[in-house]
Image (cartoon, helix red, strand yellow):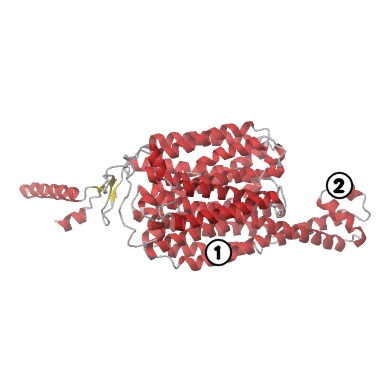
């Protein structure tokens, strides 16, 4: 009996050694580490998890930097006496991301230089965060935000690194876990800056940049020491530096950078600093649009291996068509998201709550729900080996929430908060599953480039539609608010003859002028305030009425995506460690 037990142990050890040898990691055609076994789950170790943690921290600080300042933008503008230019504080960061994202991502793919780009961009943001607190003018703060934008421009790499160091099958779940960090950044950024401003309305926002300073520094160190990818060879390795640079799509970079910079600048100038019909607005808009058309023509006919590499759009339903739809869907996601990010605070401040901390707190159900649900969507997608089903459900809920925002009335404070959380349930799906879809449909050697095209499409959608929303809202408010104020004031007893004096004095908060108008009583002022709220509510509806139809289109488009189940396997395309298959005792016995 004892002898039989010894023999059993020996036989089992031989079987384990045989299987371990059979499922040894592979290398690709260039000699790079890879894991090629489609149906055998690899065993991951601390090196992979530490790398993931560094990307998690990067996503946290990127979104914290993006979402914090807009929450108290009016306070910043007033403190620096630059209210006319204050929209450039968040927009300068987004502009850098939209313009530089494709450039650094394409270089990252060509040179396999993920780490140096990630660390370098974080260091630039670290410097920008140190410059911002001392700002005595809006110009210096915008310059600091531009530097911080370099770290935000690395968003495509922050998305693609987790996907390429984990099995393809886990990509939806990987993006979900990373997006939890983004949700925490979206919560903690506005709450932190809101709390600081609540305590010190004049200078509180400055301390927020010192928080960023610490986080960017910690992130740079975390990536430097936590993300240790093996050297990966490319076909460009034998070339000199200048020859490598010459292989990049320099013409495409120049056209895209120039076109986007001019177009987005024009969109940000219009309706704010200058009228839409002004030459200062139309000049960059028209020239930027023409340059972008030239970029599209060049990428189509002038080159096949540029930023819009033709390989991304080829390969059938599960590849080219799915990638194209993912770019289209992320564009719509940007349209829906920024109707909330920019205009829900406007709605809340004008209708329900003006305190900066409570104003920020009322927006948090959206991000809390999104952070919780993103893991559920990611798990469902991984389990079902499908992107389109969970993605369609998410867009459906998000669209329903957008329609709900269009129905809000001044007295529906609680409903507004509930609707925020409901919309967040839907928002948990689009970003993570679209990015996972891009990573599953694009060739690995173009994964960062494909991600950058996707995130730039989102940034363009956000900027273009924010301008459209703002123009539509302003146009309606200019008519509806005075009309509602007049109707409410007359209903409360004010003589119609007094309206020409009353309306401008009331809207501009000229207390001395109001006191001099005959018939102005506390009841009239209260009624006029209610009328103003109703006018704002009716004006804001147009934002969500514009956004909602795009959500409906997205729901339908999801079901035209290809079947990605075959490509959702256990292959790891760029592991950071030497991977082997997990040894499952049940399978060992079967193989024996």
Which residue is painted at 8% across and 48% down in the image? 7
Q: Quadrant of residue 132?
A: top right
The residue lying at 61 percent from left, 52 percent from top is 287
Left or right: where 550 falls relative to 301 = right
Instruction: Specify whether residue 188 is in view.
Output: no
Residue in the foreground of this view, choosing between 589 and 381: 381
Q: Looking at the image, is 287 positioned above or below residue 73? A: below
Q: Quadrant of the C terminus?
A: bottom left
Q: Position of residue 382 (x, y in %)?
A: 38, 58
Query: Which numbered disc flags the more N-terminal residue, 2 or 1?
Result: 2
User: What distance separates the C-alpha of mark 2 from that of mark 1?
Assistant: 44 Å
Residue at screen point 60% across, 59% down: 419
Q: Considering only vertical position in the picture, is 229 above or below 556? A: above
Q: Is residue 578 visible?
A: yes
Q: Badge 2: how crowded within 10 Å, few (<14), some, or many (20+)?
A: few
Mark 1, residue position: 551
Height in image: 485 above or below 225? Answer: below
Q: Nearer the viewer, mark 2 or mark 1?
A: 1
- In this view, which residue lies farthest toward the front? 302
Q: Position of residue 121 (x, y in %)?
A: 48, 38
Q: Which mark is residue 535?
A: none
The percent coordinates of residue 223 (x first, y second) are: 42, 37
Q: Nearer the viewer, residue 415 or 216?
A: 216
Q: Dot 1 lies on which element?
A: helix
Q: How many residues crowd mark 1 within 10 Å: few (<14), some (14–19), many (20+)?
A: many
SS assignment at label 2: helix
x then y, percent, for residue 319:
38, 61
Task: Name the residue rendered at 69%, 46% in the picture.
Answer: 355
Whether the residues at callouts 2 and 1 have beta carbons within 8 Å, the answer is no
User: As rendered, which of 46 and 88 lies closer to the eye?
Assistant: 88
Q: Residue 511 has which mark? A: 2
Q: How many marks?
A: 2
């Amino acid at each position: 009996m004892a002898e039989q037990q010894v023999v059993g142990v020996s036989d089992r050890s031989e079987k384990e050694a045989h299987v371990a040898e059979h499922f040894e990691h592979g290398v690709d055609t260039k000699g790079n580490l890879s894991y090629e076994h489609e149906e055998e789950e690899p065993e991951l170790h601390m090196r992979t998890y530490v790398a993931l943690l560094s990307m998690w921290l990067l996503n946290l600080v990127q979104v914290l930097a993006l979402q914090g300042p807009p929450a108290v933008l009016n306070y910043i503008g007033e403190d620096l006496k630059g209210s006319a230019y204050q929209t450039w504080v968040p927009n300068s960061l987004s502009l850098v991301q939209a313009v530089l994202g494709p450039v650094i991502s394409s270089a990252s793919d060509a040179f396999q230089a993920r780490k140096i780009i990630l660390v370098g961009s974080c260091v630039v943001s670290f410097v920008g965060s140190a410059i911002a607190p001392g700002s005595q003018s809006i110009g210096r703060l915008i310059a600091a935000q531009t530097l911080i934008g370099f770290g935000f421009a690395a968003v495509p790499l922050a998305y693609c690194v987790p996907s390429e160091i984990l099995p393809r099958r886990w990509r939806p779940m990987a993006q979900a876990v990373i997006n939890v960090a983004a949700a925490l950044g979206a919560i903690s950024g506005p709450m932190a800056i809101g709390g600081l401003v609540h305590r010190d309305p004049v200078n509180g926002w400055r301390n927020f940049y010192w928080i960023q300073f610490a986080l960017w520094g910690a992130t740079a160190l975390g990536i430097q020491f936590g993300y240790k990818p093996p050297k990966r060879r490319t076909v460009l390795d034998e070339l000199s530096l200048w020859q490598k640079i010459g292989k990049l799509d320099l013409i495409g970079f120049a056209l895209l950078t120039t076109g986007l910079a001019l177009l987005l600048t024009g969109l940000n100038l219009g309706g704010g600093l200058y009228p839409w019909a002004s030459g200062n607005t139309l000049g960059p808009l028209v020239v930027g649009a023409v340059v972008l058309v030239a970029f599209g023509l060049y990428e189509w006919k002038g080159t096949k291996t540029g930023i819009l590499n033709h390989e991304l759009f080829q390969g059938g339903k599960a590849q080219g068509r799915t990638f194209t739809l993912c770019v289209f869907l992320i564009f719509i996601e940007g349209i829906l998201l920024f109707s909330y990010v920019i205009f829900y605070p406007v709605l809340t401040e004008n209708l329900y709550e003006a305190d900066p901390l409570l104003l920020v707190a009322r927006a948090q159900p959206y991000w809390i729900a999104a952070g919780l649900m993103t893991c559920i969507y990611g798990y469902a997608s991984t389990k079902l080996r499908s992107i389109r089903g969970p993605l369609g459900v998410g867009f459906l809920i998000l669209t329903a929430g957008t329609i709900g925002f269009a129905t809000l009335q001044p007295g529906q404070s609680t409903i507004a908060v509930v609707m925020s959380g409901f919309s967040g349930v839907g928002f948990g799906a689009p970003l993570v599953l679209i990015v996972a879809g891009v990573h599953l449909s694009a060739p690995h050697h173009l994964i960062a480039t494909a991600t950058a095209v996707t995130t730039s499409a989102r940034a363009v959608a956000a900027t273009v539609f924010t301008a459209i929303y703002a123009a539509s809202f302003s146009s309606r408010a200019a008519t509806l608010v005075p009309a509602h104020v007049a109707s409410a004031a007359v209903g409360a007893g004010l003589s119609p003859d007094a309206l020409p004096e009353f309306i401008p004095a009331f809207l501009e908060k000229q207390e001395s002028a109001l006191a001099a108008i005959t018939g102005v009583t506390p009841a009239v002022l209260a009624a006029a305030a209610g009328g103003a709220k109703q006018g704002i509510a009716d004006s804001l509806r147009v934002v969500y009425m514009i956004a909602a139809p795009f959500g409906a289109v997205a729901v339908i488009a999801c079901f035209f995506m290809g079947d990605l189940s075959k490509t959702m396997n256990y292959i790891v395309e760029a592991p950071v460690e030497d991977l082997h298959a997990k040894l499952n005792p049940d399978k060992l016995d079967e193989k024996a």
